[in-house]
Amino acid sequence: MNDRFWKIYNAYIERDGCDQLRNWLLSTDLETAPASTKFHEAYSGGLADHSVKVFDELVRLLKSYPEVKVTAETAAVCALLHDVCKLNCYKTEMRNKKDEYGRWVQVPFYTFNEDFAFGGHGSKSVYLIQRFMPLTDEEAVAINCHMGASAQDYSVYDAYRRFPLAFLLHTADMAATIDFELVPEVKK
Ligand SMILES: [Fe+2]
Ligand SMILES: [Fe+2]
């Protein structure tokens, strides 16, 4: 598993409840969970890889938007934990597939099967995290809304995947449209 996940977690997340949350994460399939069935990081350990990538992207974006001030702890909480709703949800099944010589072989594939169907993606992550560790309102909203438009329509995600320009234009449009309600005090 991506050892940067725990390096970032241990370096930045230190509020009350972080130890209990760490123990819960260690009791899940975080070590092996993929990030999706077949889209991004669909392999063992993919969810941890994805979470670390989101951290790196978030740090990059925060550097580009210096007026958005968040603590390193908040960035780590949001990035590393935004998809904990996916833990313990991916199961491996076998299916027949033709190999390169045209022979039928059994190959493993992931299915998504929630033991705890909460009924929401980001909101489930918020709920699970707060079983152990409190979130600020800002963190809870960020995690709850992290899917953006693709929460309503997965074809948007596919469009972004195939045409990165579409994603960049969306992000640019959001950035140009949203009038950030900036919190006046400077956070450390
Ligand atoms: Fe994600
Ligand atoms: Fe997600």
Image: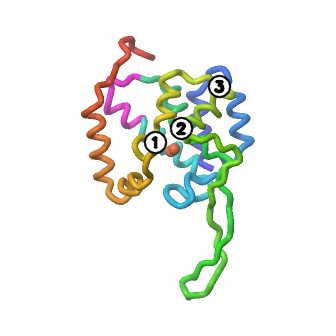
Q: CA distance from mark 1 to mark 3?
A: 22 Å
Q: Amino acid at mark 1?
A: Met
**Callout 1 environment at 10 Å: few (<14), some (14 to 19), or many (20+)?**
some
Residue 158 percent coordinates (x, y):
40, 57
Residue 177 percent coordinates (x, y):
26, 32
Say which mark, if any, is on residue 147: 1
Looking at the rendered image, the disc whose residue lies closer to the viewer, 2 or 3, is 2
Task: Indicate the quadrant containing the C terminus: top left, top right, bottom left or bottom right.
Answer: top left
Marks 2 and 1, the one that precedes in the sequence: 2
**Callout 3 environment at 10 Å: few (<14), some (14 to 19), or many (20+)?**
some
What residue is shown at x 48% (from left), y 24% (from top)? Answer: 138
Left/right placement of residue 161 relative to residue 79 reads left
Q: Secondary structure at mark 3?
A: loop
Looking at the rendered image, the disc whose residue lies closer to the viewer, 1 or 3, is 1
Marks 1 and 3, the one that precedes in the sequence: 3
Whether the residue under disc 2 has CB within 8 Å of ligand 2: yes
- To which residue does mark 2 refer? 122
What residue is shown at x 36% (from left), y 53% (from top)? Answer: 160
Q: CA distance from mark 2 to mark 3?
A: 16 Å
Left/right placement of residue 168 relative to residue 128 reads left
Say which mark, if any, is on residue 172: none
- Image: magenta residue range: 59-69
- To which residue does mark 3 refer? 133
**Callout 2 environment at 10 Å: few (<14), some (14 to 19), or many (20+)?**
many
Q: Secondary structure at mark 2?
A: helix
Q: Are marks 2 and 1 in contact (CB under 8 Å)?
A: yes
Whether the residue under disc 1 has CB within 8 Å of ligand 2: yes
Left/right placement of residue 185 relative to residue 177 reads right
Q: Amino acid at mark 3?
A: Met
**Residue 99, placed above or below residue 150:** below
Residue 95 percent coordinates (x, y):
65, 73
